[in-house]
């Protein structure tokens, strides 16, 4: 993807909007797809603000092990899990179940 002079947060949000309902991805997978030198941490910074943006399904971005590490940035401690469950994702103890099965890789799905 050509990053040009576009804001990195906007690029992250564009990718997150592409994650289908019932699937999740990781901060690192997004960073890799975008070629972000700051890596997963930069994606995390973008996601910290995204939960308040209704058109960005921030709940669909988890850590590389499927853990809901960003849950404390939502309006309540359980909101991220509630949204994932509404998306059809099974979550137990802040862990996406069948993570490998529901993982969405932007590099494969959107092309490099």
Image (tube, rainbow, N blue to C red):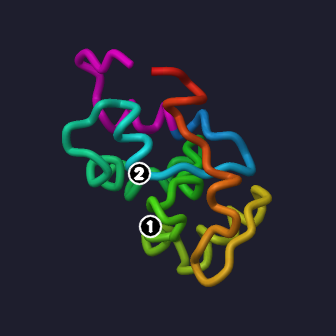
Question: Comparing marks 2 and 1, which lies closer to the viewer?
Answer: 2
Question: Residue 13 at what x, y percent from top left?
Answer: 46, 37
* Residue 11 position by quadrant: top left
Q: Does the magenta stretch include residue 9?
A: yes
Q: Is mark 1 on a helix, strand or loop?
A: loop
Q: In this view, does 42 lie above or below 9?
A: below
First to last magenta residue range: 1-15
The residue to which callout 1 is attached is 70
Q: As drawn, is 29 to the left or to the right of 86?
A: left
Q: Is residue 88 magenta?
A: no
Q: What element carries label 2?
A: helix
Residue occupying the far left of the picture: 37
Question: Residue 52 at what x, y percent from top left?
Answer: 50, 55
Q: How busy is the neighbourhood of tag 2: few (under 14 within 10 Å), some, or many (20 plus)?
A: many
Labelled disc at residue 46: none
Q: In this view, does 35 lie above or below 65?
A: above
* Front position in the image: 51 or 104: 104
Q: Is residue 9 above or below residue 43?
A: above
Labelled disc at residue 27: 2
């Amino acid at each position: 993807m050509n990053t040009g002079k576009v804001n990195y947060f906007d690029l992250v949000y564009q990718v997150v909007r592409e994650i289908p309902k019932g699937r999740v991805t990781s901060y690192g997978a997004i960073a890799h797809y975008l070629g972000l030198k700051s890596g997963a941490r930069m994606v995390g910074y973008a996601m910290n603000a995204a939960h308040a943006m209704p058109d960005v399904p921030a709940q669909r971005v988890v850590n590389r092990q499927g853990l809901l590490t960003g849950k404390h940035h939502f309006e309540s401690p359980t909101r991220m899990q509630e949204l994932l469950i509404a998306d059809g994702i099974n979550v137990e103890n802040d862990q996406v179940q069948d993570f490998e099965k529901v993982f969405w890789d932007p590099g494969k799905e959107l092309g490099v």
